[in-house]
Image (spheres, rainbow, N blue to C red):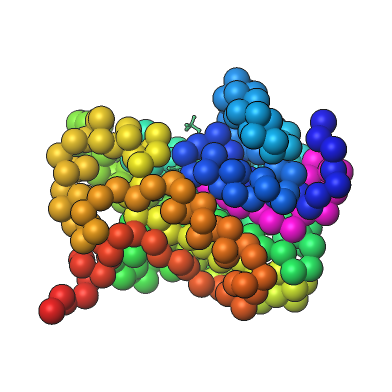
């Protein structure tokens, strides 16, 4: 139980690389309600934050499960006034197959936005995590058609249709490719879904936006470096700044985006990728 004399920040993926860095910043003036899938890691994270004087409560939540996400929203409301919701929980092709990526990244984001719509105090903000992978191509029309079905029981299948079912003779490389497609498809959805929610959040005086990191050195990115070193090297070659991002650089930006200084920023994606997408998509001089 946390003592609630502060406003509440709900943070999914609270035990992740970016989640931890964000708690260090937002935990200065918020009580943190951390959601993640591992009870042990939540306990360890809470203890680490407590040593730094940051109040935090942990709740085991699988964001792809709507009932668990509703329980998270209910717990947040019990604790006090929620003014900030940061949804970082996500899976990448280095750690999960296409189907799981669709469930966690796309369905999980719908669950979070639906559960917290109307529950964030006026002046508050919701930030959902996309990826630079969302911006590597112009989505074909069928992606947008599928995104339009976000509130339909067939949404998962509509996304899976685009990626394709697993082939019987698929090898590891085929599956990694399929997972990569699912990642780009679902992360673009996250960015589009934030924008699709701009007006209904604004009606309650709440901002909503997506944040798209490039390659930052967190446990998620470390998996890619360990399991797909060639791919990681290729990514580095496509990064004009010539280094991986640091989670602290995400956290500082998120703190700013949650502050009144960014009070007019809503309905957009913020891409922070070391210049990768500009290098890939815009002719350089
Ligand atoms: N790091 C990057 O370079 C990078 C680049 C682009 C976009 N992003 C995005 O930024 C966000 C944060 O990334 P990160 O690097 O901090 O990743 P991370 O270190 O892997 O943290 C993500 C956290 O979410 C948890 N999680 C996974 N599935 C979940 C579920 N179903 N319900 C609740 N929690 C779940 C993870 O647990 P497990 O560890 O057990 O899976 C982990 O603790 C992600 O959405 C990611 O896609 C990251």
State the residue at coordinates (44%, 46%). 247
Looking at this view, is 167 or 88 the one in front?
Answer: 88
277 to 32, vertically: above or below? below
Residue 277, x across and y down, in percent: 27, 65
The answer to whether residue 276 shows anywhere in this view is yes
Looking at this view, is 138 or 60 the one in front?
Answer: 60
State the residue at coordinates (30%, 60%). 274
State the residue at coordinates (28%, 37%). 224
Looking at this view, is 151 or 28 the one in front?
Answer: 28
Let me know if residue 224 is in the magenta part: no
247 to 173, vertically: above or below? below
Looking at this view, is 252 or 73 the one in front?
Answer: 252
In this rendering, position of residue 5 left or right of residue 33? right
Residue 56, x across and y down, in percent: 71, 36
274 to 46, vertically: above or below? below
Residue 16, x across and y down, in percent: 50, 37
Residue stretch in magenta: 75-89
In this rendering, position of residue 218 left or right of residue 22? left
Let me know if residue 88 is in the magenta part: yes
Residue 256, x across and y down, in percent: 57, 63
109 to 229, vertically: above or below? below
The answer to whether residue 198 shows anywhere in this view is no
């Amino acid at each position: 139980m946390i003592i609630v004399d502060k406003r509440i920040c709900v943070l999914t993926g609270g035990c992740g690389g970016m989640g931890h860095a964000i708690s260090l910043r937002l935990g200065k003036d918020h009580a943190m309600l951390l959601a993640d899938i591992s009870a042990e890691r939540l306990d360890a994270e809470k203890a680490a934050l407590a040593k730094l004087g940051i109040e935090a409560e942990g709740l085991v939540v699988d964001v792809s499960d709507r009932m668990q996400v509703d329980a998270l929203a209910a717990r947040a409301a019990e604790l006090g006034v929620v003014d900030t919701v940061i949804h970082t929980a996500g899976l990448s092709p280095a750690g999960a197959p296409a189907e799981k990526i669709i469930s966690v990244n796309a369905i999980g984001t719908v669950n979070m936005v639906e559960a917290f719509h109307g529950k964030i105090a006026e002046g508050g903000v919701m930030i959902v995590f996309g990826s630079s992978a969302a911006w590597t191509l112009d989505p074909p029309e069928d992606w947008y058609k599928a995104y339009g079905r976000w509130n339909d029981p067939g949404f998962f299948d509509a996304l899976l249709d685009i990626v394709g079912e697993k082939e019987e003779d698929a090898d590891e490389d085929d599956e990694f490719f399929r997972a990569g497609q699912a990642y780009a498809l679902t992360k673009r959805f996250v960015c589009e879904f934030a924008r699709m929610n701009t007006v209904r959040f604004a009606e309650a005086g709440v901002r909503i936006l997506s944040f798209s990191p490039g390659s930052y050195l967190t446990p998620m990115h470390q998996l890619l470096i360990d399991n797909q070193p060639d791919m990681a090297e290729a990514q580095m070659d496509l990064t004009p700044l010539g280094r991986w991002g640091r989670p602290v650089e995400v956290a500082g930006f998120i703190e700013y985006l949650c502050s009144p200084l960014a009070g007019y920023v809503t309905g957009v994606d913020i891409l922070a990728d070391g210049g990768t997408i500009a290098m890939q998509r815009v002719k350089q001089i």
